[in-house]
Amino acid sequence: MSDAAHAHDDHGHHAHPAGIMRWLTTTNHKDIGSLYLWFSLIMLFTAGSMALLIRSELFEPGMQLMHPDFFNQLTTMHGLIMIFGVIMPAFTGFANWQVPLMIGAPDMAFPRMNNWSFWLLPVAGIMLLGSFWLPGGAVAGGWTMYPPLFIQGGVSYDLTILAVHIMGLSSIMGSINIITTILNMRAPGLTLMKMPMFVWTWLITAYLLIATMPVLAGAVTMLLTDRNFGTHFFNAAGGGDPVMFQHIFWFFGHPEVYILILPAFGIISQIIPTFARKPLFGYASMVYATASIAILSFTVWAHHMFAVGMPVAAQLFFMFSTMLIAVPTGVKVFNWVATMWKGSLTFETPMLFAIAFVCLFTIGGFSGLVLAMAPVDIQLQDTYYVVAHFHYVLVSGALFSIFAGIYFWLPKWTGHMYNETLGKVHFWLSVIGMNIVFFPMHFLGLAGMPRRIPDYALQFTEFNQIATVGAFIFGFSQLVFLYVVLKAIKGGAKASDRVWEGAEGLEWTLPSPAPYHTFETAPVVK
Amino acid sequence: MSLAQTDKYYLPQPSLWPIIGSVALLTMAVGGVMTMHHMNHGGWVLLAGVAVLFFMMFGWFGEVIRDSEAGRYNKQVDSSFRWSMSWFIFSEVMFFAAFFGALFYTRVLSVPWLGESDTMQQLWPAFKATWPTAGPGLTADGLKFTPMEAWGIPAINTLLLLSSGVTVTWAHWGLKKNNRTQLILGLAMTVALGVTFLGLQAFEYHHAYTEMGLTLGAGVYGATFFMLTGFHGFHVLVGTTMLIVMLLRSLAGHFTAEHHFAFEAVSWYWHFVDVVWVLLFILVYWLI
């Protein structure tokens, strides 16, 4: 057997196909990681442009630029693409690049399936974006796809349902791959409780994905049959219940929220110790906190639907279970702060984004606690307060962690240091722009401005104008990011193997840039 | 962990199969949407997508089988397969959980609510919120159906599937003892039981549609009944197909007493389908 394996191993070193065929057929985790990250970046600019269109329409009350239905299409697609096309693929890209390097594995467990997980995403992207040109336009029912509205739409609604199926397939295969790689391919001596925090958070994220993506598939399948095959799952005349969709959807949807943030916790937990030059404070408690968040995430879903009408006992249960999540999340925030405490801190761009993450994500966490209170939530449901809340956790949370991770690992991937000055420019523009967009939305929401509305009452004008200005600052400053990344790929100061003075872990023992094949002989971890 | 550190890990070459699979799914999705919206040639596009998908499965799985027969999968790869199949079955469990959840929610919560409130009493005074139901609106419109009885075909099907769980295990014992006759005989019996199950279920569906007024459109009872048993039936179809492949591979002399994870994976899948059926029999057919 060993002979056969060696004989075949030669193939691994043959020149891979050139040009586009290299990327279409690749089974290399680094290639696939890059594909995920580029896809995510292109989608960031696509869905970001939609956000700028939305903010342009909202610059003034009254209808300026577009038909209300097109506005609804933009909000729906902005949400779907940012979640499934930007944040999730970016984290999967990080997992592809980093998990094998961090655990000393030669590649992912299933390289061919890894390729398919990626190449399903452009298929779903074509289906979602292509639907803008179909009769009736793209879906306009909101990314949450609630019936009965979603059952009444045209062709693009079915296309979107099938796109969700395909993205789910991609996520499930990707997660099985990641979970198997982590459980089965760690270097000798790298026990579970020695794994880098990023690997831990992805292990738990992959579990959440495998548990909830099939539930989403079931929910949208019921939508599909209600639309096309005469079932009555969500129609009270046939004994069904539209609220049932919300229960099934959010049983997926709330764990999904943690799918979008746990890898971010992992990235931040790698970066802060590096630039504080201290080991992560409370490693074991970080692991247990991550696992607790994941388990609790299955018990809180109905806090998304307090206003829909539920027995009081259910409201109380979901209110308290939601508040309980603040405990493990608080453990994490305190651990990051304690890691920095009395550290030899330096403030390179990854660290700046990480510190901004800790501060601003916590604001998003606090507004989440406000919304967790059922009586308050009934007032704030579907207002801009909710929009402010989830953009604080998704933009200054998930997206900032992605920026932090890119700056952190880019020298290892490209072999070049990025331009630190431009990185800092990108950071300050982003952090200022982001707060100008989203902080006023708290006030708009508290004053009662509903979300997903293209027009608004006169008294909301000033805060909306401030938000729009911030949106353009934030949006266009991402071009700086694109420039910095392209420049680092093309050249720049040579990165050392360790890259950062305080960097610890297997990936920093490799040369920069990391060679095409790494850890073909597993390193031994003591 | 300590597995096979002396062996080099097997890294497959670049492969075209995944992108062919992506093309297949895109074609199927577009064809499916065209068919659902009664556009011209939608069915052909859908069929073309399915054909490409089958081509991909033949090619890809064939490559995996050849790799396996060439002895390229060491113990660590074998262990990866075991982990991944377990997690895949877990994902299937969660898919069925969504539909069992819908059944639970409507039966225990939302249908009783339909009978409780004053508004409902005003709208549909004649409606009785009992299970099984086609719902207040459809009932008022005169929709009538007979619910499926557990102690006919469904009971026979339970017997068939439980026996097939025994025969597949017996085949596995044969494989482990290197008794090829027992392996092939056991697999053939399992396939026969699976096919019989599918035949009986097709008959049951036909009977439901033509004699009992029980259709996919028969309210939430019809919807949960057909979606749960239908997805289960589809899984039996997939499982039976996989068992047939295992039977053909056994006849071709594949598998050794020590190295036969493909067979084990199929038997895990088959037992999973079996367990889902037992739940279906109790919750969908029996307790109504």
Image (cartoon, coloured by chain):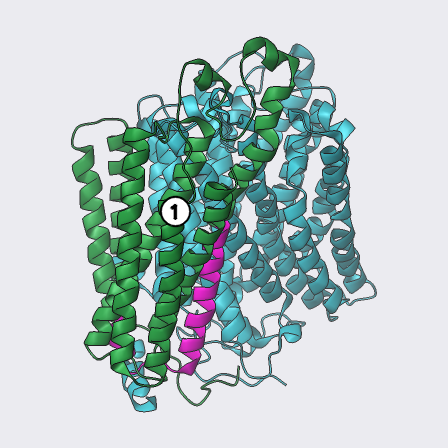
The picture quadrant where one finds residue A177 is bottom left
Q: Is mark 1 on a helix, strand or loop?
A: helix
- Residue A237 position, x and y percent, is 48, 19
- Residue A398 position, x and y percent, is 60, 48
Residue receiving disc 1:
B154
Magenta stretch, main secondary structure, is helix
- Frontmost residue, A276 versus B116: B116
Q: Residue at x 57, y 51 (%)?
A: A259
Q: How many labels does the image show?
A: 1
Which chain, by letter, is cyan? A
- Counting other residues with Cα less than 10 Å from the Cα at mark 1, is it few (<14), some (14-19), or many (20 or more)? many
Task: Answer yes or no: is residue B70 visible.
Answer: no
In this picture, is A24 found above or below B125?
Answer: below
Tell me what hue chain B is rendered in: green
Residue A321 appears left or right of A106: right
Q: Give the range drawn in magenta.
A: B65-94
**Chain containing mark 1:** B
Quarter of the rendering occupied by the N terminus of chain A = bottom left
- Frontmost residue, B275 versus A354: B275
Please, what is the three-letter code of the amino acid marked with disc 1?
A: Pro
